[in-house]
């Protein structure tokens, strides 16, 4: 039976992933995931697509009371309770997401790291800073199948694909068969699987360094041909909120 092998969240969108043992799936997605994001000096969303090295910065976030720690690759940290400043509206995949700039030293430290002006923003509501859909699923079997393809020059780490839930106990690409249906995770949470996950340039980056090392979308399409994007894993919406933990059963 499929089960949750690992959980990945990014408290700050596009920064390094955290792997908690338990998360709360709220009505709009995982409450702790992508609660904050970055904008450049023009107020545009800044992600690994533009700045691959962001993955080298690790974030730890607590919601109540709000607290954040950023750890940089040189070992420097910036941490403390969050204080909010002016209103910021960020365009994220066609949506206008309302938030507030985070005051304090975080933006300065991120600007120094990126060598450009950067502001840290907290969205007003959780579950707003996703790309197409709030939750992504990928199976370990699919990841292993990709690694067996001719031309696979790296060992594929699940973090390259940043799935919220990495599943084990599945057949290869079994998650695709859930499209249009629902899956229960643990005792309470229920997700509606709504779309295949189109993979972007971020999957070409080494998940430790953020440097490009393999043409992952082309490799996917070499054995999963499609007229458009390279699809790998699936997206989901929340039908019923609830906690999800590593080891929880996944029932389609």
Image (cartoon, rainbow, N blue to C red):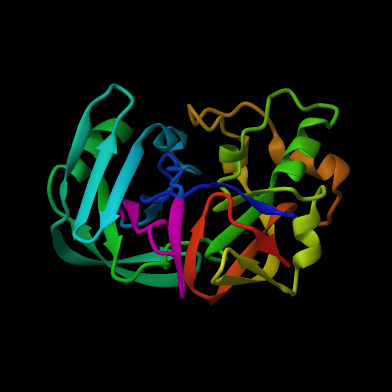
Query: Seen from this angle, which residue lies furthest bottom?
Result: 239
Left or right of residue 46: residue 94: right
Quarter of the figure with the N terminus? bottom right
Left or right of residue 123: residue 238: right
Instruction: Identify which residue is drawn at 61% across, 70% down.
Output: 191
- Residue 242: % across, % down: 48, 70
Left or right of residue 51: residue 137: right
Q: Quadrant of residue 55?
A: top left
Instruction: Identify which residue is drawn at 85% across, 28% down.
Output: 150
Instruction: Identify which residue is drawn at 68% across, 55% down.
Output: 198
**Residue 41 seen in the figure:** no
- Residue 11: % across, % down: 37, 51
Q: Is residue 24 magenta?
A: yes
Stretch in magenta: 22-42
Instruction: Identify which residue is drawn at 70% across, 34% down.
Output: 215
Camera-side residue: 2 or 100?
A: 2
Camera-side residue: 221 or 73?
A: 73
All told, the count of numbered labels is: 0
- Residue 63: % across, % down: 27, 59
- Residue 40: % across, % down: 32, 49
Quarter of the figure with the C terminus? bottom right
Q: Quadrant of residue 235?
A: bottom right
The correct choice, above or below, for 163 with respect to 192 in the image is above
Camera-side residue: 185 or 7?
A: 185
Q: Is residue 10 magenta?
A: no
**Residue 23 seen in the figure:** yes
């Amino acid at each position: 039976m499929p089960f949750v092998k690992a959980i990945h969240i990014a408290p700050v969108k596009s920064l390094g992933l955290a792997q908690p043992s338990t998360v709360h799936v709220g009505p709009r997605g995982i409450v702790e995931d992508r609660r904050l994001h970055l904008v450049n000096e023009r107020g545009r969303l800044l992600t690994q697509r533009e700045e691959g090295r962001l993955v080298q910065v690790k974030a730890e976030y607590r919601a109540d009371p709000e607290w954040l720690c950023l750890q940089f690759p040189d070992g420097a940290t910036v941490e403390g309770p969050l204080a909010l400043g002016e209103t910021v509206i960020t365009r994220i995949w066609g949506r206008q997401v309302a938030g507030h700039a985070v005051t304090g030293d975080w933006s300065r430290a991120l600007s120094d790291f990126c060598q450009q002006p950067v502001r840290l923003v907290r969205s007003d509501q959780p579950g707003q800073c996703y790309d197409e859909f709030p939750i992504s699923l990928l199976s370990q079997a699919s990841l292993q199948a990709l690694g067996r393809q001719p031309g696979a020059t790296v060992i594929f780490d699940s973090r390259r694909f940043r799935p919220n839930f990495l599943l084990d106990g599945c057949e290869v690409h079994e998650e695709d068969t859930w499209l249009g249906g629902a899956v229960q995770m643990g005792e309470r949470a229920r997700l509606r699987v709504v779309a295949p996950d189109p993979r972007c340039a971020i999957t070409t980056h080494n998940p430790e360094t953020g440097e490009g090392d393999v043409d992952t979308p082309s490799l996917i399409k070499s054995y999963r041909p499609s007229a458009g994007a390279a699809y790998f894993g699936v997206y989901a919406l929340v039908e019923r909120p609830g906690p999800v933990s590593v080891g929880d059963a996944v029932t389609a």
